[in-house]
Image (tube, grey):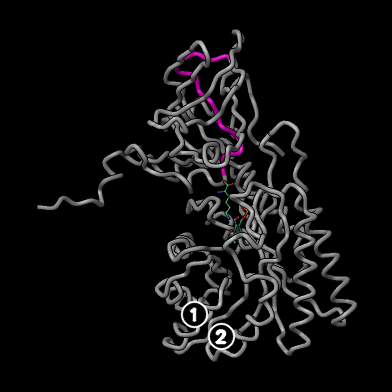
């Protein structure tokens, strides 16, 4: 159910007017809807009900502590990719015992922290990483729970920067080398081989590539079983996409439909080969939980019509939302208060000194300076990818719950952007 709707001609997040939010907290500001967040998470939880399954929210999509806390209280686990993200999970009251650690470059310090905090599992992506983890666990007198991230060489049919499951990508152990890598892992004294993992890419609109990857993992689990390596879980990663409103794009597969098909396959396989003995299933969704729950609220500073192009200069920029310039991503824009006046074609750009600093191109909008715009579907990979380029303080973040507005991250001041720096004599 959409929670960003016009009421009396003004765009609202649940019961709160975006215009009132801009007046109180300024712009640019990320505005999240708590109801959307919970509905999206519960689409996974509901499809997993009564099953041995764990939804590990991929917090790289949006790691605001209040977001993590809300999801943790719904039973979420977390997929992390750094020691910093683990510290956020803990600060938000999340459970390290429901946390899995992905990523190709884990440091010794990160491994040590994760072992000391008792995470559920390391998703290991290479043989050198296995050896490092074995050594770190040995030094601590512990055994590290390990799942291998296998690269199933499946084409996820998404933007090349966010496809991760092809041979050409840096991620995971190649499918052909997976068996030998499992043997190597099983022979190391300080590792417990517990699972298998893959993540083939992000913003997938169709679940066919995910089910193809599942079939490959299933075959591999059977081969490992025959070798005496018995796994306790299968982690299929994240990747389900959202509707950004791109003309011609098919709508994304509903989460419940995808999980239904996935569980049906797993159940049929377990019934045929393992007397129906269940296998724990882990998911790592990010975008499909938070993207639709957020908008980026920005104000028009100047209108600069020109012979070739009309530029609408707003107070948000590529440092606040990198997706358009990084991926050429199309993001929806809506006027917070709609005008009756004539619409013109605008390129919506920020104040940063780069021609790549654009948020939207060729949009038909009726605008005046001072108007507010909402960039839609901006709750994922927005604030988490923000930077301080041009010494811009990062945006504020608020969560709306009904008609209550919670400021969950105050605006960063420009002075705070250089507070860690020091002069030399
Ligand atoms: C290992 C891993 N898991 C999960 C995710 C979350 O993906 P998405 O936001 O597409 O669900 C990502 C990002 O693509 C990832 O790299
Ligand atoms: N940052 C990307 C997704 C990255 C996925 C991380 N593995 C995006 O905005 O679409």
Residue furthest to the front in view is: 168
Pick the front one: 396 or 233: 233
Q: Is residue 392 left or right of residue 79?
A: left
Instruction: Name the residue tied to disc 2.
Output: 191
Residue furthest to the left in view is: 425
Q: Residue 87: percent from the left, percent from the top?
A: 43, 64
Residue furthest to the right in view is: 272
**Residue at figure coordinates x 68%, y 44% from the top left:** 242
Q: Looking at mark 2, is its residue's CB closer than 8 Å to ligand 1?
A: no
Q: Start and end of the magenta stretch?
A: 366-379
Neighbours of disc 1 within 10 Å: few (<14), some (14-19), many (20+)? many
385 over 296 or under it: above or below: below
**Residue at figure coordinates x 57%, y 62% from the top left:** 170
Residue furthest to the top in view is: 341
Determine whether label 2 and label 1 are within 8 Å by CB.
Answer: yes
Circle 2 sits in a helix, a strand or a loop, which is it? strand
Q: Which of marks 2 and 1 is nearer the N terminus?
A: 1
* Residue 348: numbered disc: none
Whole-angstrom CA distance, mark 2 to mark 1, is: 8 Å
254 over 85 or under it: above or below: above
Q: Is residue 181 magenta-colored?
A: no
107 over 242 or under it: above or below: below
* Residue 133: numbered disc: 1
Q: Residue 332: percent from the left, percent from the top?
A: 62, 31
Pick the front one: 252 or 335: 252
Circle 1 sits in a helix, a strand or a loop, which is it? helix
């Amino acid at each position: 159910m959409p929670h960003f709707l016009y009421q009396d001609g003004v765009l609202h997040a649940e019961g709160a007017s975006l215009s009132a939010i801009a007046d109180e907290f300024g712009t640019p500001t990320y505005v999240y809807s708590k109801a959307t967040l919970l509905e999206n998470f519960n689409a996974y939880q509901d499809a997993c009900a009564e099953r041995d399954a764990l939804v590990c929210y991929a917090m790289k999509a949006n790691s605001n502590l209040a977001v993590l806390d809300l999801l943790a209280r719904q039973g979420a686990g977390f997929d992390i990719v750094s020691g910093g993200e683990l510290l956020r999970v803990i600060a938000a009251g999340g459970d390290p015992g429901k946390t899995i650690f992905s990523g190709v470059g884990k440091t010794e310090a990160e491994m040590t922290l994760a072992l000391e905090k008792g995470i559920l599992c390391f998703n290991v992506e290479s043989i050198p990483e296995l050896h490092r983890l074995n050594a770190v666990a040995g030094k601590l007198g512990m055994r590290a729970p390990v799942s291998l991230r296998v690269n199933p060489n499946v084409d996820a049919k998404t933007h090349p920067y966010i496809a991760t499951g092809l041979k050409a990508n840096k991620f995971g152990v190649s499918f052909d080398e997976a068996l030998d890598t499992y043997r190597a892992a099983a022979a190391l004294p300080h590792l417990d081989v517990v699972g298998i993992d893959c993540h083939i890419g992000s913003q997938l609109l169709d679940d066919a590539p995910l089910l193809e990857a599942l079939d490959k993992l299933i075959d591999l689990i059977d081969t490992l079983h025959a070798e005496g390596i018995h796994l306790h879980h299968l982690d299929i990663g994240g990747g389900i996409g959202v509707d950004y409103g791109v003309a011609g794009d098919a709508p994304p597969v509903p989460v419940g439909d995808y999980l239904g098909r996935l569980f049906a396959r797993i159940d049929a396989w377990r019934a045929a080969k393992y007397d129906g003995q269940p296998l724990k299933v882990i998911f790592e969704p990010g975008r499909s939980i938070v993207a639709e729950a957020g908008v980026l609220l920005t104000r028009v500073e100047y209108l600069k019509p020109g012979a070739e192009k009309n530029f609408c200069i707003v107070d948000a920029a590529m440092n606040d939302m990198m997706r358009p310039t990084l991926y050429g991503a199309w993001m929806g824009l809506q006027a917070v208060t709609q005008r009756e006046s004539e619409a013109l074609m605008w390129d919506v750009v920020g104040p940063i000194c780069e021609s790549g600093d654009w948020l939207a191109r060729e949009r038909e909008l009726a605008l005046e300076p001072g108007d507010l715009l909402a960039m839609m579907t901006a709750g994922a990979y927005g604030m988490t990818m923000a930077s301080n380029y041009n010494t811009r303080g990062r945006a504020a973040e608020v969560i709306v719950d009904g008609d209550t507005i919670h400021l969950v991250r105050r605006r960063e001041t420009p002075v705070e952007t250089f507070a860690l720096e020091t002069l030399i004599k």
